[in-house]
Amino acid sequence: MRVNNIRLASIVGAVYLFLYLPILVLIVFSFNDGISSYEWRGFTLRWYHELILNSEIWSVLRNSLIVAFSATVLSLILGTMVVYGLQQKLDRMVQFFYLPILVPEIVLSVGFLYLFSFLRIPMGLPTLIAAHTLLGLAFVVPLVHARFAEMDKNLVEASLDLGASQWQTFAKVVVPFLAPALFSAGLLAWIISFDDFLISFFCAGSSSQTLPLYLYAKIRVGMSPLINVLSAVTLFSSCGLVVIYSYMRSKTEDLI
């Protein structure tokens, strides 16, 4: 029995090593002093310094931040409106919001492309924000709905009976109760939008470029230590957001 456990642990460890070894190599070579991305020449931080001074990277980073922030805010606003506005009816409809997750992303991306082309909407940051907002709703609505279902509806009725308006009740009773779920859903929507490539590839157009598209374009012409640095920084940022999301998710479950 012990031999089987050791064998299983070895297999699982080998699989995880195979999956994460390329990421570790990428991080290590982001500190490489040589121009080549495949030959170690010594430790240096100059590529991180060049990344800070690169205006082109800051431009595409700004686009990614605009898209991620806008899509996250719109997803939270629209998702909260759907949950609070439909309430009981949403119990039978919440499954439909999982469709953007269940449908392969390549199909979803091509669908967005055909839709925007049919409506003659120019491709750019607005179309990308709209597509990412729809994708974000697939995460926001189920999370917020699950939290709202745990709320004691007597609190809402008590607030209305004491003279508060519908808006005051929503702002001072409902929103504070939903805050942990909103924060967790917002982080998840942000991560999905910021790291997305396929939808960005089809919906961003030629005039707008996000960080994943920039990385793809640079890799096609050859790897450089600057790409390793940019990938490492993006990885650390995404991991930090995932850790925050996991923490907030655990706090929400404890409250429930």
Image (tube, helix red, strand yellow):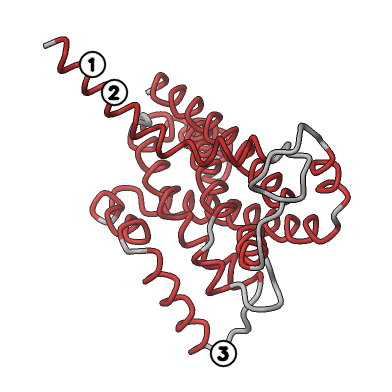
> Dot 3: what SS?
loop
> Can you tell which of label 3 and label 1 is closer to the viewer?
1
> Can you tell which of label 2 and label 3 is closer to the viewer?
2
Residue placed most toward the observer, 254 or 113: 113
Say the numbered circle drawn on residue 120. 3
Inspect the image, locate mark 2, and give the three-letter code of the amino acid beneath it: Ser
Q: Quadrant location of residue 253?
A: top left
Spatial CA distance of label 2 from label 3 is 55 Å
Picture layout, residue 36 above or below residue 113: above
Q: Which residue is drawn at 52% across and 82% down?
A: 116
Spatial CA distance of label 1 from label 2 is 6 Å
Residue receiving disc 2: 10
Q: Which of marks 2 and 3 is nearer the N terminus?
A: 2
> Dot 2: what SS?
helix
Residue placed most toward the observer, 79 or 205: 205
User: Is the C terminus in the top left, top right, bottom left or bottom right quadrant?
Assistant: top left
Spatial CA distance of label 3 from label 1 is 60 Å
User: Is the N terminus in the top left, top right, bottom left or bottom right quadrant?
Assistant: top left
Residue 7, horizontal then vertical, whole percent: 21, 21
Say the numbered circle drawn on residue 6. 1
Horizontal relation, residue 253 to residue 246: left or right: left
Q: Residues within 10 Å of mark 2 (few under 14, many from 20)?
A: few
Residue 33, horizontal then vertical, whole percent: 78, 40
Residue 147, horizontal then vertical, whole percent: 39, 35
